[in-house]
Amino acid sequence: MSITVRLPNIITGLLLLLSLLCKDGIAGAWPNGKGHFYAKISHLRFSNQQTFNEQGTKRQNISPDFLGALGGVFEEGTFESAGFSFYGEAGVSSRIDVIFQLYSATIRNKWRFAKEGNPDIVQENQGLQTLTVGMKYNFFTTPVIFSVRVLGSVPTYRNNQKELNIEPEDLDFYDNHPALGNGAATLSITPQLGYAFKHLPLWLELEGGIRFRANLFSDELPFRLQLGYKFRDSIYLATSVDAVRSLGNGAWPNFFRNEIGKGPFLINDQEHLNVSMNAGFAVFGPVWLEAEYVKTVTGKRTPAGQTFNFGISVKH
């Protein structure tokens, strides 16, 4: 049996969200100070079998909400991503930090047919994803920390244009390499507030800003709130809530409004609310082991998945 359909690759389009769902946290409000730095290498894993539709209802990836007439063809659809990231920030003065971040990943779509007799479909791609550079400027440190972070991100891959065109020819289901992302550059500007409690080993961070996106994608308003606890300078625990609201000002079509085969699988106007748990342990000197778990609680046009992040960091 030969199938040459295109829309089931929509799960690859959900990779647009991976930059929010399964990547290291970006610099907090506190400056490093001149001559000091923080660097981290991480391994990240993300998977999902369900997706929030346009109304915010969680559906299986094989639902007719996403696959139209093909909704009954498959028994199971899974998206997976596993990769590495390097993140670094360094103080060039008492107020200014420079930031660098690079991601690589292997992404995989798995499709299991409802009827026996057809081999499972596995679509895979791997490579560098995104390079991010920027800076953070600290305005004052008392009574609260106030900084502004500016980041620019560019894709470090080149997508197959046949797969990205709005009206391409049908793709061979068994001979297709999923796109590593949407190919859009971004620019974000984020004010940050931080507060360390005087008589308790607690800290609180709040940030919110705007992310401008190229290639006709809608701009976004990201938000994050974090509460952390540090024990004897060798263990920390933290919990965070982060959200993204789309401004809806992009011209890129939204596949949820299209019949099968009539729209792009790259998704616009994603929104989500995530809850995460973080922990860190000082191994020796400036070396830490860190772990993070991220769960998508609700959203629209976004994968209902979870992320595991394990890394080793050095702070000097």
Image (cartoon, grey):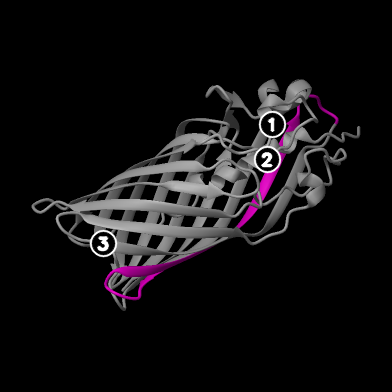
Type of amino acid at the residue the image marks with label 1 = Phe
Side (left or right) of 142 relative to 276? left
Earlier sequence position, callout 2 versus callout 3? 3
Side (left or right) of 81 relative to 176? left
Labels 2 and 3 touching (C-beta < 8 A): no
Labels 2 and 1 touching (C-beta < 8 A): yes
Most common secondary structure along the magenta stretch: strand
Labels 3 and 1 touching (C-beta < 8 A): no
Query: Percent from the top left, x then y, of residue 291?
Result: 39, 53
Picture quadrant where residue 89 is located:
bottom left
- Secondary element type, mark 3: strand
Query: Percent from the top left, x then y, of residue 252?
Result: 67, 38
The Cα atoms of the two marked residues, 2 and 3, are separated by 39 Å
Earlier sequence position, callout 3 versus callout 1? 3
Picture layout, residue 211 above or below residue 27: above
Side (left or right) of 28 relative to 159? left
- Secondary element type, mark 2: loop
Label of residue 216 in the image:
none
Type of amino acid at the residue the image marks with label 2 = Leu
The residue at which mark 1 appears reads as: 255
Q: Is residue 103 visible?
A: no
Query: Percent from the top left, x then y, of residue 115?
Result: 80, 24
Q: How many marks?
A: 3
- Which residues fall within the magenta stretch? 89-117
Label of residue 139 in the image:
3
- Is residue 182 located in the magenta-colored stretch of the structure? no
